[in-house]
Amino acid sequence: MLEYKMPSLGADMESGFLREWRVKAGDKIRKGDIIAEVETQKGIVEIEVFDEGIIGELLVQADEQVPVGRTMATILTEEEAGKAATVPTKAAAPLIEKAVAPPHHIRASPLARRIASEKGIDIATIHGTGPDGAVTREDVEHAIAAQVAPPATMSEKPELSKEAAPARPEEKPVTPAIEVPPAAPKEPPKAPVASAETIRMAVAAAMSKSNREVPHYYLETKTDMQPALTWLTEANKQRPVKERLLPAVLLIKAVAKALSDVPDLNAWWENGLQRKESINVGYVVALRTGGIMVPTIHDADTKSLDEVMLALNDLIPRARALRLRSSELADSTITVTSLGEGGVETVYGVIYPPQVALVGFGGITEQPWTENGMLAVRPVLKITLAADHRASDGSTGSRFLTAIKNYLQQPDKL
Amino acid sequence: MTQEEIKQALLLRLKSIAPDTEPAQLQPDDNIRLTLGIDSFDYLQFIVALDDQFGIDTPEEDYSKIQTLKELTEYVEAKVKK
């Protein structure tokens, strides 16, 4: 029997709120199946399993706060499940029933829950028109429209979770825009609804941990992007608009290939250096409302440029909508950030623990460039590496940056 | 299709690509990407949506010509008439 535990979805996560089980006891599961939806500071995350088997017991109920590492469910082998079916245990049965269908559990899509929660509407009061009476986004929007005026007790800002509170003790005196009367008849939301504020706190927690614990060293180089940009322009001319590539795809692929040459930087630092086999690149997506999300492009080294672009097309909108899967939040083995669009030339990043490196790309600017004794004007890109000095040294970092540079000189080989 | 209809369609598209922005507040000469904080990824999605909606083809070399709402509206109008 295996125990499925609440996964850690980042250095900043201490617990999550189970919002919905997608499986019930007795269901067969395969690697990669989504078994639950958990709400974190970074939105509602679909939780995947990495084992095969049959769901034994569900040990946590919807809307319960679950610390990282607590067992959420048991997973049985076929044989164990067969035995369990013939000898039903008295204790387990009611627990399963309770967990699968708690009396007040309302079927609703995660988005519907989030919108309702943001607007302070009790989802139980909304009539669902979806499958099996599930409350859909449209139902919630109708309910919002039907509300003549929001109750005066509704606070715009949800309460912060306990783990977030100590980091900002000065928050309390700030008076909210709407005064909350002392006798508020409605219950405040139990969980921190993901918002710009909770995401800011998640970033704050992870970056503080990094600066506290990780001895960073920084290296910088620059490269002539003319070959890469010329290649990209020609490649895009041949493509319909839907299949066009962005420069970021070349950068991500160059990093992934360079990591296969210098594997010491494709690692986590957890009780020592743990090299990772898969090269999973976390790509920083800036949210317009503030904060960042860093979804993972799995196995970026083996993906073609088109496949990396497809992955971005899938991940970026979901990252912005705060709808990522657990593996997309937790699997990155390195982070890439590209700040070029704002006109910045150089990025000195902060590593996202437990990773041991972060590559920063600035903007491409025209600069004087000398080569073979000749002076020319070229589109120049600055590449920086922030690396964990516990895990690697400058010579390793230097080999890695040089490898990225070399790959960008030969875009047709990416 | 009138210029005003094209403009309204563009604003709707921008809102659907970047729901957390206020395209309706764009002035004709505002740089769309800078004003709304739209990155190259969102902009590409926007061009894909435009090409779909208006049945036009926007080559990459034209991106620099369609940076403001006014430029973009006139660009789409000219392409649709062709």
Image (cartoon, helix red, strand yellow):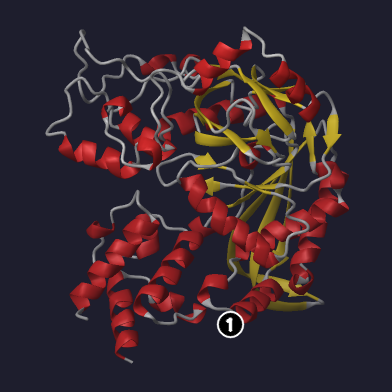
Q: Is residue B43 above or below residue A135?
A: below
Q: Is residue A22 above or below residue A311?
A: above
Left/right placement of residue A118 relative to residue A332 reads left
Which residue shows up at 49% across the image and 19% down it? A164
Which residue shows up at 68% across the image and 36% down it? A29
Which residue shows up at 68% across the image and 60% down it? A251
Left/right placement of residue A12 relative to residue B46 reads right
Q: Quadrant of the N terminus of chain A?
A: top right
Q: Nearer the viewer, residue B3 or B62?
A: B3
Residue B20 rendering spot, x and y as whole percentages? 35, 48
Outermost residue on the bottom side: it is B82
Residue picked out by circle 1: A237
Left/right placement of residue A167 relative to residue A115 reads right
Regarding mark 1 in the picture, which secondary structure is present there? helix
Residue B27 rendering spot, x and y as whole percentages? 24, 64
Q: Residue A36 sits in which quadrant?
A: top right
Q: Nearer the viewer, residue A93 or A33?
A: A93
Which residue shows up at 50% across the image and 42% down it? A323
Q: Amino acid at mark 1?
A: Lys
